Amino acid sequence: MSESADKSMSPIQPQTPCIVIEQAVMERNIQAMAEAARSHGVQLRPHAKTHKLPEVAHRQLQAGAVGITVAKVSEAEIMAQNGITNIFIAYPLVTPDKIGRAIQLSRQITLIAAVDSLEGAKRMNEAAGLSGHPLQVRLEIDTGLRRTGVLYDQAPELAARIHELEHLRLTGIYTFRGAIHKQKPTLDLQAAGEEEGRMMADLAGRLRASGIPILDVSVGSTPTGRYAAAVKGVTEIRPGTYVYQDRMQARLGVCSLEDCAGSVWVTVVSRPSADLAVVDGGSKTFATDVQPGVEPLMLQGFGHVEGLDDAVLERLSEEHGMLRLGPDAQKANPQIGSRLRIIPNHICSTVNLHNKVFFKNGPEFEEMAVLGRGMLE
């Protein structure tokens, strides 16, 4: 990685708890997704929510990405300040401050904004008109996740209304669906991705037939992106987690645990009993949004403990992680002061808990501030 004021090289192992990224594994992941997009003739616009680092975004661009995706205006501002010049904010902007900041940013870089309602579109149109600077927008479609996005059947009417607005340029549609098939969570990623792609490509065709010049059909998460990309009419995929991977993706079958570049390093601080080890990472270290025992993943604990396969990170308090040790882990007998590596269930939310990460290249560690951490507005 290149030198900057935000990072330093050291042969000394970092203090725990911390996130360590295996640089070679990350690079392999970046290249593999770039090749998948190229092989299907679609653009790659990775979501930066996973790494929140301009340097990693630059590496994705160097590998062939057309731009990046973010969720918040503040993330876009951080990325633009650090040389990223093509950004899609995949989140509805409805308040005057955020719309104004997006317009200002769009004067400096190629910026695409998101919209999913007529009210939001009118607010953006008015602000763009007052500024004398039109905004390029994409319409978000709800294809089954029931989050943001106009309902699929109502999309043509809303798209027509937005297309009429003088100061907005409706150039595309996008969706985030994840591993959903026939309205239910699934492990059949191919079926989920192909269904997502077909729904969006069909909708784009109908919008074009009605006179709306839709150029971009943007779909695909890390689990479904490769399969959605194979659908004719899809033009772009936006995976994010792939850059580091995590236990959730491994359970979905997207990757192996060996493909997980990111892990949390912790230290055993207490051994109250033979079947219990306590580590120095709790809920302020590990994200808890992907809960154990929930279908379809049915994960055990909050992460995979490398080298102790029957150890389960079973409970978290703020600063403590409680490992239940199975028979094999008890035989291994991790001692107080020993370090463990745990692949978290969800790396994206875990990264956002940390001010810095450490990139590991052989015996050397490179500390890097997570510049996009906490950029929530």
Image (tube, rainbow, N blue to C red):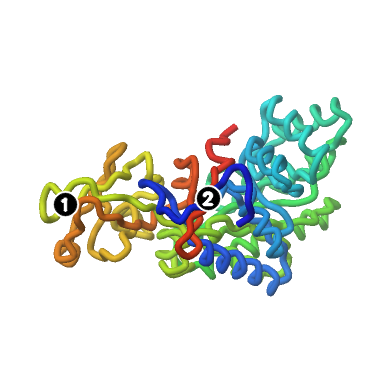
Marks 1 and 2 close (CB-CB < 8 Å): no
Q: Position of residue 164 (x, y in %)?
A: 84, 39
Question: What residue lies at 66% left-to-right and 39% top-to-bottom?
Answer: 78
Q: Is residue 181 visible?
A: no
Task: Report the amino acid beneath label 1.
Answer: Leu
Q: Which mark is residue 162?
A: none
In space, the residues marked 1 and 2 are separated at their CA atoms by: 38 Å
**Residue 332 occupies quadrant:** bottom left
Q: Position of residue 257 (x, y in %)?
A: 41, 67
Residue that mark 2 sits on: 145
Task: Report the amino acid beneath label 2.
Answer: Leu
Q: Would residue 120 appear left or right of 330 to someone viewing this image?
A: right
Q: Position of residue 32 (x, y in %)?
A: 60, 70
Q: Who is closer to the viewer here, 375 or 333?
A: 333
Question: What residue lies at 59% left-to-right and 48% top-to-bottom?
Answer: 53
Question: What residue lies at 29% left-to-right and 54% top-to-bottom?
Answer: 301
Element assignment for label 2: loop
Question: What residue lies at 86% left-to-right and 52% top-to-bottom?
Answer: 211
In the rendered picture of this protein, how many numbered marks are placed on residues? 2
Q: Which numbered disc, 1 or 2, marks the residue that appears first in the sequence?
A: 2
Q: Who is closer to the viewer here, 300 or 201?
A: 300
Q: Would residue 55 appear left or right of 102 to someone viewing this image?
A: left
Q: Which is in the foreground here, disc 1 or disc 2?
A: 1
Instruction: Pick the quarter of the image with the C terminus.
Output: top right
Q: Which mark is residue 276?
A: 1
Instruction: Pick the quarter of the image with the N terminus.
Output: bottom right
Q: Residues within 10 Å of mark 1 (few under 14, many from 20)?
A: some
Q: Is residue 122 visible?
A: yes
